[in-house]
Image (cartoon, rainbow, N blue to C red):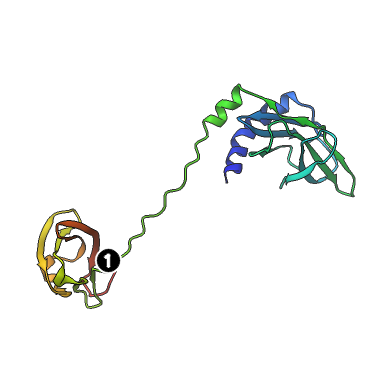
């Protein structure tokens, strides 16, 4: 995903200059921008290109290995980003295959440092991790039953000092139950005055151990 975002933003800018400045394939341009190698090219071949494989090597003459391919080899302007090169002075070339079986290689070159326009473009790219959705999980201590009553189910209530406080959806205090000694309580919905969403806080010996919510419906069906 990061590669695609950078490709779209950076290569668009590079291609605008490439169209005016560089010779078409089999010539390519390679720029080193913030240690990312950006390859760009212009395709003016009349023959149909079927494959464009990007190759990389420590040596300018041999040991080239394919590190990626282009999904749209026929595009007029295109590019590729090597986001994590193992060495900042690697050599690059492109293998070009044509319909019918003929093939050629582009010129071989290293990425040229560019600290002008394109650095600003990369620095302006902000990649945010999507926030995880807020998934509500019902409480196992205080919850609404199938009969649409509120159940207070607490472990070892006799030996603990439980207190439960109840609030409306807008945080208006309704009532509290102090020093709960029963493991299982049933609270009729009439105690809450109306249907809807309610919040609660559960304390043990004055320490908050849970803050959650539950929903009381009109027809007795759980939300």
Q: Nearer the viewer, residue 44 or 54?
A: 54
Q: Position of residue 195 (x, y in %)?
A: 18, 66
Q: Nearer the viewer, residue 199 or 66?
A: 66
Outermost residue, top side: 116
Q: Is residue 80 left or right of residue 162?
A: right
**Up-down relation of residue 114 to residue 125 (above or below):** above
The quarter in which the C terminus is drawn is: bottom left
Q: Position of residue 74 (x, y in %)?
A: 76, 43
Q: Tell me which corner region of the image, top left, top right, bottom left or bottom right, holds residue 206.
A: bottom left
- For image coordinates 17% across by 58% down, the residue present is 168
**Up-down relation of residue 34 to residue 72 (above or below):** above
Q: Tell me which corner region of the image, top left, top right, bottom left or bottom right, holds residue 179.
A: bottom left
Q: Tell me which corner region of the image, top left, top right, bottom left or bottom right, holds residue 211.
A: bottom left
Q: Position of residue 220 (x, y in %)?
A: 23, 75
Mark 1 crowdedness (10 Å alpha carbons): few <14, some 14-19, many ≥20? some
Q: Is residue 185 left or right of residue 99?
A: left
Q: Nearer the viewer, residue 143 or 161?
A: 161
- For image coordinates 60% across by 23% down, the residue present is 117
Local secondary structure at mark 1: loop
- For image coordinates 89% across by 49% down, the residue present is 101
**Up-down relation of residue 61 to residue 20 (above or below):** below
Residue under label 1, please give it.
139
């Amino acid at each position: 995903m990061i590669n695609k975002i950078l490709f779209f933003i950076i290569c668009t800018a590079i291609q605008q200059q490439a169209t005016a400045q560089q010779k078409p394939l089999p010539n390519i341009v390679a720029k080193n921008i913030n240690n990312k190698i950006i390859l760009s090219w212009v395709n003016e071949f009349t023959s149909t290109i079927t494959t464009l494989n990007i190759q990389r090597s420590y040596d300018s003459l041999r040991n080239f290995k394919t590190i990626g391919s282009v999904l749209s080899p026929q595009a007029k302007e295109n590019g590729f980003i090597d986001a994590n090169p193992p060495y900042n002075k690697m050599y690059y070339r492109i293998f070009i295959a044509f319909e019918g079986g003929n093939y050629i290689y582009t010129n071989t070159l290293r990425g040229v440092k560019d600290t002008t326009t394109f650095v600003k473009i990369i620095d302006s790219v902000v990649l945010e991790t999507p926030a995880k959705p807020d998934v509500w999980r019902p409480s196992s201590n205080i919850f609404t039953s199938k009969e649409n009553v509120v159940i207070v189910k607490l472990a070892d209530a006799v030996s603990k000092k439980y207190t439960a406080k109840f609030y409306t959806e807008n945080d208006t205090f309704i009532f509290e139950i102090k020093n709960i000694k029963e493991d299982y309580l049933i609270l009729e919905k009439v105690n809450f005055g109306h249907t809807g969403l309610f919040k609660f806080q559960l304390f043990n010996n004055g320490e908050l151990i849970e803050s959650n919510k539950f929903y009381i419906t009109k027809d007795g069906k759980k939300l």
